[in-house]
Amino acid sequence: MSRPAFDELPRPFLKWAGGKRQLLTEIRRRLPRRMATYYEPFLGGGAVFFALARDGAFERAVLADANRELVEAYRGVRDHLEAVLGLLEQYPYEQDFYYEMRARDPYALDLPHRAARLIYLNRTGYNGLYRLNKKGEFNVPFGRHRNPKIRDEENLRAVSAALQGVDLRNGDFAEAVADAAPGDAVYFDPPYVPISDTAYFTAYDGTTFTMEEQARLAEVMWSLDGRRVHALLSNSESRESRRLYRGLNVERVLASRAINSRADRRGPVGELLVRTKPGRKA
């Protein structure tokens, strides 16, 4: 039995660095129309997953991310929606409350409070950033929004419905796709190969995705190619990215970047979409 399709909802409930809403059309064209299991090991805001859920494109899904707090926000919305909605209804858009909420240790909270806290900080903090200091503490300042929608009930209900039965994992990208087989599809949206000294998106989640990790990810892509799994990957348009994926199907596309400390660097930039070739003979 296929999963239900959605119209306009669900859509991402968190703003996340590197979000793919601007590239959805290009990405969707390069994924199968139907797939048995959909894997997304760098979940982030989940724009691609939600688009596929709206289409009813997969039978099941495995979503993963190395960011524990992010994954648990998804679990909170999936498993404790009413509690999360109730909490968000109580949270005011006030600077003092924001800093009080920011100071709370998320892992001292239960799952609904943890999810509601991240949604609130994401909706009311500066530019929707997720950034940790060296102590692992969330340190984004209060944002100056006109009227932030802290409790988007309609979308959160659609998100929760789409996540029912979905396997949500906090862990490594290679482990997340270990069971992928022909008939499945994988989409990788990793921290990008840097194109300048200040281009590391990894600063937003407090981790470092090194060039060694980039090389390991390329090995996973080649492994999926050998297993005849349809896999698609986004990365920066750079000499290193092209070197890593030479021999696979590499295409250049333009994407809009909304998160950058400098407004003049938020326009269209070149990116690469890399695909395996699962139809060819081994």
Image (spheres, grey):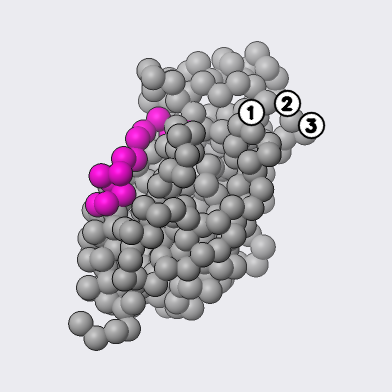
Q: Which secondary structure lies at badge 1?
A: helix
Q: CA distance from mark 3 to mark 1?
A: 12 Å
Residue 221 disc label:
none
Q: Residue 242's x, y, as percent?
A: 38, 60
The circle on residue 146 is: 3
Amino acid type, residue under disc 2 in the picture:
Arg
Q: Are marks 1 and 2 in contact (CB under 8 Å)?
A: yes
Residue 264 as seen in the image, left or right of residue 136: right
* For marks 1 and 2 on the same chain, the one whose residue lies earlier in the sequence: 1
Q: Residue at x 39, y 19 (%)?
A: 134
Does label 3 or label 1 sit earlier along the sequence? Answer: 1
Q: Is residue 210 visible?
A: yes
In the rendered structure, which segment of residues is drawn in magenta?
204-216
Query: Could you tell me which quadrant the N terminus lies in?
Result: bottom left
Identify which residue, 160 or 170, lies in the foreground.
170
Which residue is depicted at the point 33% across and 66% down? 246
- The residue beneath circle 2 is 144
What's the residue at 36%, 52% (across, down)? 240
- Alpha carbon of mark 1 to alpha carbon of mark 2: how far? 7 Å
Mark 1: give few (<14), some (14-19) or many (20+) Cα within 10 Å.
some
SS label for mark 3: loop
Q: Is residue 153 visible?
A: no
Which residue bears the numbered disc 1?
126
* Outermost bottom residue: 281
